[in-house]
Amino acid sequence: MQKPTDYGNLFLDMNAFFASVEQQVRPELRGKPICIAPYVGNTGCCIARSYEAKDYGVTIMRVGDAKKLCPQIKIIEARPEIYVFYHRQILEVLECLNPCVEVKSIDEFNLKLTGLDRKKENAFKLAGKLKNAIREQVGDYLKCSIGISSSPWLSKVAGEIKKPDGLTAISLNQLPELYKKLKLTDLPGINLKMEAQLNRRKIKTASDFFNASLSNLSLWFGHPGRLWYFRLRGFGVDGFHSPAKSIGHSHVLAPEYRNKAAARRVLAKMAEKCAKRLRKKDLWTDSVRISISFLGGGYFSNYLKIGLVSDSSSISTAALSQYDQCQINKSPLKVSVTLFGLKQMQNAPISLFAEDEKSKRITQTLDQINDRWGDDTIYYATQFGTDEAAPNRIPFGNPGRLSF
């Protein structure tokens, strides 16, 4: 494993991106509390909000609750095509100043620093150029926070320290003091459920996590615990994945789920889990297969080729439509879902259909909520009543979307 150097990465995070884009294109919204929602009714969810709205305590919550906190808030229906347009404009600007740009999400980018740019003063100069170029060439109301450190993950930690429009560098010798100031949930990839898992191991703070021994983390969490040990010390251990050919999930049904209606709900849950694993690996799928084994014998399998997708709704719909074609009148014993035809997400096409884009945004919102509060905090109604079925198998994943 290559030893980390202090300033090898620059992580750029666009501040309140969706809300800022709306304020960029609609100057009358500038300086005002706004939130972005897939649906503007009171039951819609605030998936993004301006800093003015955040000052009133508006978080990821129902639109109706946001209005109670801030009666003057303006609710804006999400417009994915505009956010994608500005994302591409920002990417072009970044690539002009540094060709080693990795897109982490629609509003996050990691730049690998090389040569003289690894000197702190030069890294700061580059950061200033990036901020100015975005402001001058993309939008004067768009701000970003930048973190500079040894790895993408640690650079993201640095970028979170000062928002909005911040610039922070972290050297390796600053890490012990840094972690004393951070909570566990300040670390990218640690949500409340994961925090509880760590607390049970007497790891209460980020400093406790940092000071935990390699042997203990490996004993408690296996290989992912080992990765966390090195990640916290600035090693670039993320992003090294062997290409997957398929993603699947199978489950033997408990007796209470061995009927057609209950098994269907479990299958929907499994399809959503496969979809989330797909997104964790930055992949899309174009093929969904299901299979069912029955009590007393019998087997059903079907395969459906679909358009390139990664959202939970499309994948669940494909799986359930095949399930509904099964005519075997026996009690289901085991169900499985497998995704094939996997392709890298970065160059996947943007759909021209509004409903497809809306489904993607809903999926992203669900991911954000569940990443923050723990898996299955919110889920599709087709999975209702399956709390104990098809539990998670893998305790850790990539930073940003991790689960113990």
Image (cartoon, grey):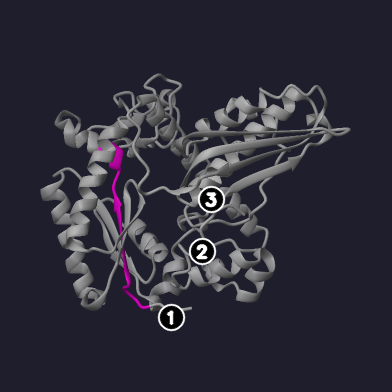
Q: Disc number at residue 174?
A: none
Q: Please give the range of residues in magenta.
A: 5-20
Q: Going from the N terminus, do you reach mark 1 or mark 3 first?
A: 1
Residue at horizontal 70%, vertical 36%?
291
Locate residue 17 relative to residue 394 in the image: left or right.
left
Q: For residue 45, what is the image quadrant?
A: top left
User: Which is in the foreground here, disc 3 or disc 2?
Assistant: 3
Distance from the alpha carbon under mark 1 to that under mark 3 = 28 Å
Residue indicated by mark 3 = 191
Name the side, left or right, on which 256 lies relative to 131: right
Q: Nearer the viewer, mark 2 or mark 1?
A: 1
Instruction: Name which residue type carries label 2.
Output: Ala
Residue at the image position 85 percent from the left and 33 percent from the top: 295
User: In this view, which residue lies farthest toward the top?
Assistant: 41
Q: Which comes before the other along the chain, label 3 or label 2?
A: 3
Of the numbered discs 2 and 1, the one sitting upstream in the chain is 1
Q: What residue is disc 2 on? A: 206
Residue 303 at x, y percent in the picture: 61, 34
Q: Which SS class for mark 3? A: loop
Judging by the rendered image, the residue that carries numbered circle 1 is 3
Gap in Å between the C-alphas at discs 2 and 1?
22 Å
Across and down, in percent, residue 404 comes to: 62, 54
